[in-house]
Image: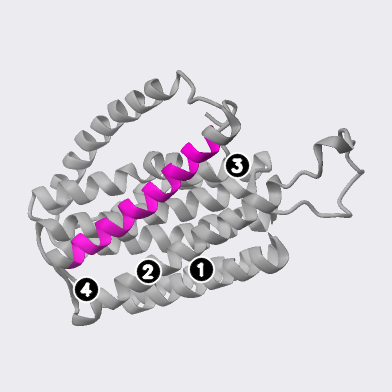
């Protein structure tokens, strides 16, 4: 799809979140159908989003660094094409798209915090969260359609095939997730038990995000690393939390405030790094991994 003209930030916002976040979405459906504890869905969402914005961006940054804008003094100067075509603004456009995506993540997290002030997420709150997500996705969809019209391009004939493949894989994820949830909920002792269902499912379902982060960081596509991780976070907050709240109310876990604050600080940190520097230095990667360690200690140790 990228080779067919789908821009990197669009891929990370409209396509990859459904591929990497489908497990979280199915988990919300399965647990809702089983009338399971809503607290575990919210835990799953927090584990997923904090891991995305700290660990899975921090580790590739520690290894390769993430440069959204090309560095002026890095390596040999590249050969430029004819001046008639004008300067290449794709990197600057990617940065602006990333800043918008980060702002949306900050906005969604803030809305969830406001809705959870009464220590529960109700049906009405779920309608608000799902509505926000649908508006956000429709905004990007119309942007893609506008660009297609402006550039006089059409969608690739492979697009329906890709969507059909996603649907087939989704059914496989549903079968495996349904079995895993039933199996874990029958275990009452030990770490791998119903007590830590949200944590275990969050770590399991974040593995596709890890593959995306390391693969695209190695390929030198930092905008995809960023947008895929942040876009996947939009699937969990607000969509997954909102969908489960349509089944039943969600009780707020004890470490909710810590998770929200880490998400807010991480979003502001990424916004400043991308907006001011256009990159994440390797030191920033260490800071993000350290923030994830704080999250683990607060959530598991207390």
Marks 1/3: CA–CA distance: 20 Å
Residue labelled with disc 1: 267
According to the image, what is the colour scheme of the structure?
one colour
Which SS class for mark 4?
Answer: loop
**Label 2 sits on residue:** 109
> Are circles 3 and 4 on residues that touch, CB within 8 Å?
no
Quick one: label 2, few (<14), some, or many (20+) residues within 10 Å? many
Report the number of discs.
4
Q: 138 above or below 230?
A: above
Q: Are marks 1 and 2 in contact (CB under 8 Å)?
A: yes
Question: How far apart are labels 2 and 3 at the CA level?
Answer: 26 Å
Tell me the tag on residue 216: 3
Nearer to the camera, 61 or 276: 276
Instruction: Please name the residue shown 70% across and 69% down the image.
Output: 276
Pointers 1 and 4 in contact (C-beta within 8 Å) = no
Q: Secondary structure at mark 2?
A: helix
Q: Earlier in the sequence, mark 1 or mark 2?
A: 2
Lower position in the chain sequence, tag 2 or tag 3: 2
Q: Nearer the viewer, mark 1 or mark 4?
A: 1
Indicate which disc, 2 or 4, sits on the residue closer to the N terminus.
2
Checking the image for residue 252, the label placed there is 4
Distance between mark 2 and mark 4 Cα atoms? 14 Å
């Amino acid at each position: 799809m990228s080779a067919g003209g789908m821009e990197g930030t669009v891929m990370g916002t409209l396509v990859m979140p459904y591929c990497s976040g489908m497990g979280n979405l199915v988990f919300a459906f399965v647990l809702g159908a089983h009338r399971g504890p809503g607290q575990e869905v919210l835990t799953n969402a927090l584990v997923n989003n904090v891991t995305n914005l700290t660990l899975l961006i921090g580790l590739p940054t520690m290894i390769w660094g993430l440069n959204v804008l090309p560095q002026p003094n890095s390596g040999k100067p590249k050969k430029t094409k004819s001046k008639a075509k004008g300067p290449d603004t794709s990197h600057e456009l990617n940065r602006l798209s990333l800043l918008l995506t980060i702002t949306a993540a900050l906005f969604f997290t803030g809305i969830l915090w406001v809705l959870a002030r009464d220590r529960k997420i109700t049906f009405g709150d779920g309608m608000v969260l799902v509505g926000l997500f649908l508006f956000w996705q429709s905004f990007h969809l119309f942007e893609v359609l506008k660009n297609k019209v402006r550039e006089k391009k059409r969608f690739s004939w492979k697009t329906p095939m890709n969507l059909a493949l996603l649907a087939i894989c989704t059914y496989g994820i549903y079968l495996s997730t349904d079995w895993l949830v039933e199996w874990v909920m029958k275990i009452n002792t030990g770490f791998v038990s119903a007590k830590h269902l949200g944590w275990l499912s969050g770590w399991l379902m974040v593995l596709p995000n890890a593959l995306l982060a390391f693969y695209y960081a190695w390929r030198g596509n930092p905008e995809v690393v960023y947008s895929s991780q942040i876009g996947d976070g939009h699937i969990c907050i607000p969509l997954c939390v909102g969908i489960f709240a349509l089944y039943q109310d969600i009780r707020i876990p004890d470490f909710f405030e810590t998770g929200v604050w880490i998400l807010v600080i991480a979003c502001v940190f990424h916004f400043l790094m991308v907006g001011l520097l256009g990159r994440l230095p390797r030191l920033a990667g260490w800071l993000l991994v350290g923030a994830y360690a704080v999250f683990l200690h607060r959530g598991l140790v207390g």
